[in-house]
Amino acid sequence: METYDAVVVGGGPAGATAANDLAARGHSVLLVDRGGRIKPCGGAIPPRAIDDFAIPEHLLVARARSARMVAPSGRCVDMPIDHGFVGLVDREHFDEFLRRRAESSGARRLRARFDRVERDGAGAAIVRLTLHHDEACPQVLRVRARAVIGADGALSEVGRQCVPGADHVPCVFAYHEIVRTPRQDFDGSRCDVYYQGRVSPDFYGWVFPHGDTVSVGVGTAQRGFSIRGATALLRGLSGLASADTLRREGAPIPMRPLRRWDNGRDVLLAGDAAGVVAPASGEGIYYAMSGGRLAADAVHEFLSTGDARALAQARRRFMKAHGRVFMVLGMMQRFWYRSDARRERFVGICRDPDVQHLTWQAYMHKRLVRARPLAHVRIFFKDLAHLFGIVSP
């Protein structure tokens, strides 16, 4: 039975980043990915992600220079990005690049399905995997792991088995269709976001350019809502009803970080498995990679010292860096996405230059902006005016 310092389950941005960082530090790493799955995602990544994780230019299939917010009434508000851009990637190629980078750093890649974590007589973790080289006769493989990182997405099987509380995760279900970009009358430098109850009763719909293709998708936590019907509606609203459909994908997206990411012994969660998707925006790639890096740091410390308390540092460091942003975005989602009347006012607020500037600065640099205190004061009073209906939406 082979032994690894770390077995990473899941080859998305979180798992591939964790595997890469641990392998680069000289640890023996097995990166397990089941393959054949592409997560539904608008593919937006901020400049900070490009810098922090050395994302090469060729992976950016488009650069968005503005966003268009569409209100329930159909009114549009453009939000230009001054002196910046939002990078857009296709997850099919982006995730594979990250997996190959981990492999080039020394991680071993294996296409397999995670089954469970077992224990040997000494209590060490034995990871049971099923290989699918021959579908008629799948092969079971067991490997010993000093540490296990579960980066296997929302409703993580690693989390459900090993981490208390990880079996009850509230989720939004996301669905998108990748369609061919029309040759004419399509702005490939703008992201459109639809805040309409008919598109999503509690989240939003998106139309994000990917160069030769477009991601058209919807998210909702409301059961019984026809997410495919809403996507068809969104394609009609955005002029993409007749565009060729290349693929369709759906998956659950966690709504908030888990209260605990580790089992206090040798298992740690990262990415969607840990619930690190930003409320309101649904942004997950940067936070997944950040969580993967922090998981690698914590596991490295654990492997070096043998102190399992080091695993809890991943969550503490993540929440210290991003907890306030998640709290503010969560409050925004709970209030502004509640009804079409509030969505109309929310889009109205987005016309404000102070709101636009601070929104883009916070998004691109991943922190709450404190450099313009007077702007925050102005926004506070404008919010109050909208809340109480003193001004028109």
Image (cartoon, rainbow, N blue to C red):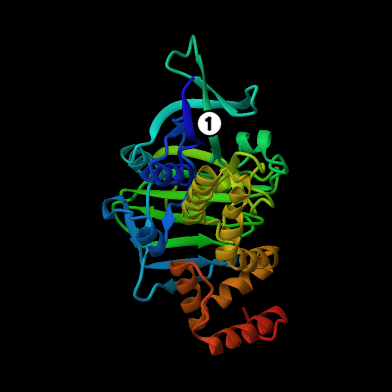
- Out of 9 and 183, give the one closest to the viewer: 9
**Direction from residue 66 to residue 318 in the image, left or right:** right
Is residue 163 rendered to the left or right of residue 230? right
Identity of the residue furthest to the front in this view: 305
- Judge the density around disc 1: few (<14), some (14-19), many (≥20) Cα neighbours within 10 Å: many
**Which residue sits furthest bottom?**
374
The picture quadrant where one finds residue 101 is top left
Residue at left offset 70%, top offset 82%: 389
For image coordinates 65% across by 28% down, the residue present is 123
Specify whether residue 248 is in view.
yes
The location of residue 105, given as percent across then percent down, is: 33, 41
Q: Position of residue 81 (x, y in %)?
A: 39, 72
Judge by depth and name the residue closer to the eye, 196 or 1: 1
Q: Is residue 60 above or below residue 47?
A: above
Residue 175, how many percent across, how many down?
Answer: 54, 44
State whether residue 188 appears in this view. Answer: no
Name which residue lies at 50% across and 39% down.
249
**Residue 60: which quarter of the image?**
bottom left
Residue depicted at 44% across the width and 30% down the height: 35
Q: Is residue 185 left or right of residue 168?
A: left
Judging by the rendered image, the residue that carries numbered circle 1 is: 145
| Disc 1 element | strand
The amino acid pointed to by label 1 is Ala
